[in-house]
C-alpha cells in the first residue's frame, strides 16, 4: 500500500480513483463500513482506492489546544486500512493555510487535480473546507462539473454502548475515558490499543515479583480510566497475555499517570527501549490504595489470575 505525506508525494500520472476523506481516527466499525464500500467500488471500477486523512487533527489547528485524545496513530490507521484493502493513504498536513481553503478549492486541489476522483464515498455528516462549509450535497453538486460521482453511506448504529447513537470516534473516546473498554471494543471492532516505548520506572513491580513494562505512550493518546485491565502486551509481533495497570500508583503516593503491563508467566524479558503495543480487553477493577504491601500483593495475584481467565475465555470464544 502507498502512504503519501502531502499532495506532492502523489506520483505523476496517477489515474482515476475511488476516494474517501476523513480523520478516520480509530478506523472503527462505522469507518470500516465506508472504507470497505470504497474498496468494493474501486474493485468494481478497476481503479485504486485512496483514503485521505489529516495530520494533525483539524481541531488542533482550528481550535488550538483542543486536540482530541487519539484512538490510533497514523501508522496504525494505515495498517488497519491496508487490512481492509485500501491501495493508498494520503496524509495531508493540516495547516492554518490549508484550513482556509474553500470547499470548492479543496475539491479542485485534492480530488480533481491530484487524485482524479471517479467516485467519492462519505458518511452523511462529512464536512470540509473553510469553517466546514462544505457538505455531501455540495460535494455532489460539484461532481457534476468535475466528472465524479458521490455515494453516501449511513453509519452503523451502536447498541448498548452508545444508547442508539451512531458509531463515532467521539463516543469511543468517551467510553475509553470512562473505562468502558468492552463498549469501546464494540465500536472499534477490536480491543483498544495504546503504543509507546518501554522506559525505566521506579521498578517496584520487579521488586514485588510482578515486573511491568512501563510504556511511555505517544502524545495525545486516548488512555483508559485508572484501573486494572486484562489484555495483551505485543512486542515484535508477539502478543503476550498481560495484566495492565493504569494510574498514578496510589499505593506509593505517585503523581504521574502511567500505563504498565505485566506479561503473565513470562520471565527474563528485557523490553527497555522497545516500541510495544498494549491492547485492553476487559476491565478488572478500579485503582485502590491498600492497607499494606501484603494486601497489595494478594490483590495483584488475584488481578493476574482474573486477567488470565478473561483472556483465555476470549481466545476460546
Image: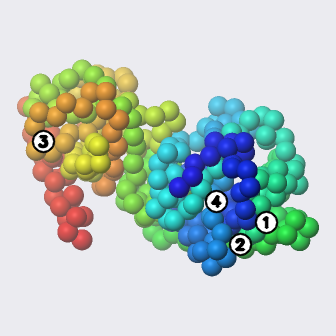
Ranked by sequence position, the earlier of labels 4 and 2 is 4
> Can you identify the residue that label 3 sits on?
266
Q: Position of residue 262 (x, y in %)?
A: 20, 39
Q: Please identify the quarter of the rendering in which residue 121 is found.
A: bottom right
Label 1 vs label 4: CA separation? Answer: 18 Å
- Quick one: quadrant of the C terminus? bottom left
> Which badge, 2 or 3, comes first in the chain's sequence?
2
Residue 290 in view of the camera: no
Q: Nearer the viewer, residue 91 or 128?
A: 91
Identify the residue position indicated by label 1 in the image. 136
Residue highlighted by disc 2: 152
> Do the residues bearing badges 3 and 4 touch, measured as CB atoms within 8 Å?
no
Which residue lies most toward the front here? Answer: 13
Point out the frontmost of discs 1 and 4.
4
Query: Which color scheme is applied?
Result: rainbow
Residue at x-position 77% and y-position 53%? 114
Considering the numbered disc 1 on the image, is that residue within a helix, a strand or a loop?
Answer: helix
The Cα atoms of the two marked residues, 2 and 3, are separated by: 49 Å
Vertical arrangement, residue 300 with respect to residue 30, above or below: above
Q: Is residue 291 left or right of residue 16?
A: left
Amino acid at each position: 500500500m502507498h502512504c503519501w505525506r502531502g499532495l506532492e508525494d502523489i506520483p505523476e500520472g496517477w489515474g482515476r480513483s475511488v476516494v474517501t476523506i476523513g480523520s478516520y481516527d480509530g478506523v472503527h466499525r462505522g469507518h470500516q463500513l465506508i472504507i470497505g464500500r470504497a474498496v468494493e467500488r474501486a474493485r468494481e471500477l478497476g481503479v485504486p482506492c485512496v483514503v485521505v486523512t489529516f495530520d494533525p487533527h483539524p481541531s488542533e489547528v482550528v481550535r488550538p489546544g483542543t486536540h482530541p485524545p487519539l484512538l490510533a496513530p497514523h501508522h496504525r490507521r494505515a495498517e488497519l486500512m491496508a487490512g481492509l484493502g485500501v491501495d493508498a493513504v494520503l496524509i495531508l498536513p493540516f495547516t492554518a493555510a490549508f484550513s482556509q481553503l474553500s470547499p470548492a478549492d479543496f475539491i479542485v486541489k485534492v480530488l480533481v487535480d491530484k487524485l482524479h476522483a471517479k467516485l467519492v464515498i462519505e458518511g452523511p455528516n462529512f464536512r470540509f473546507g473553510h469553517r466546514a462549509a462544505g457538505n455531501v450535497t455540495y460535494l455532489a453538486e460539484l461532481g457534476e462539473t468535475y466528472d465524479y460521482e458521490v455515494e453516501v453511506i449511513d453509519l452503523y448504529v451502536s447498541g448498548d454502548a452508545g444508547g442508539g447513537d451512531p458509531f463515532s470516534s467521539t463516543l469511543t473516546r468517551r467510553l475509553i475515558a470512562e473505562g468502558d473498554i468492552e463498549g469501546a471494543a464494540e465500536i472499534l471492532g477490536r480491543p483498544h490499543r495504546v503504543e509507546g516505548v518501554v522506559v525505566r520506572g521506579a521498578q517496584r513491580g520487579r521488586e514485588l515479583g510482578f515486573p511491568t513494562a512501563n510504556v511511555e505512550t505517544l502524545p495525545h493518546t486516548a488512555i483508559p480510566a485508572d484501573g486494572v485491565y486484562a489484555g495483551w502486551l505485543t512486542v515484535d509481533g508477539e502478543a503476550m497475555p498481560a495484566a495492565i495497570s493504569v494510574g498514578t500508583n496510589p499505593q506509593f503516593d505517585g503523581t504521574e499517570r502511567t500505563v504498565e503491563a505485566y506479561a503473565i508467566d513470562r520471565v527474563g524479558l528485557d523490553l527497555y527501549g522497545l516500541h510495544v503495543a498494549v491492547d485492553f480487553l476487559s476491565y478488572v477493577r478500579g485503582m485502590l490504595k491498600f492497607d499494606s504491601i501484603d494486601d497489595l500483593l494478594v490483590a495483584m495475584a488475584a488481578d493476574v489470575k482474573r486477567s488470565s481467565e478473561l483472556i483465555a475465555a476470549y481466545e476460546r470464544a
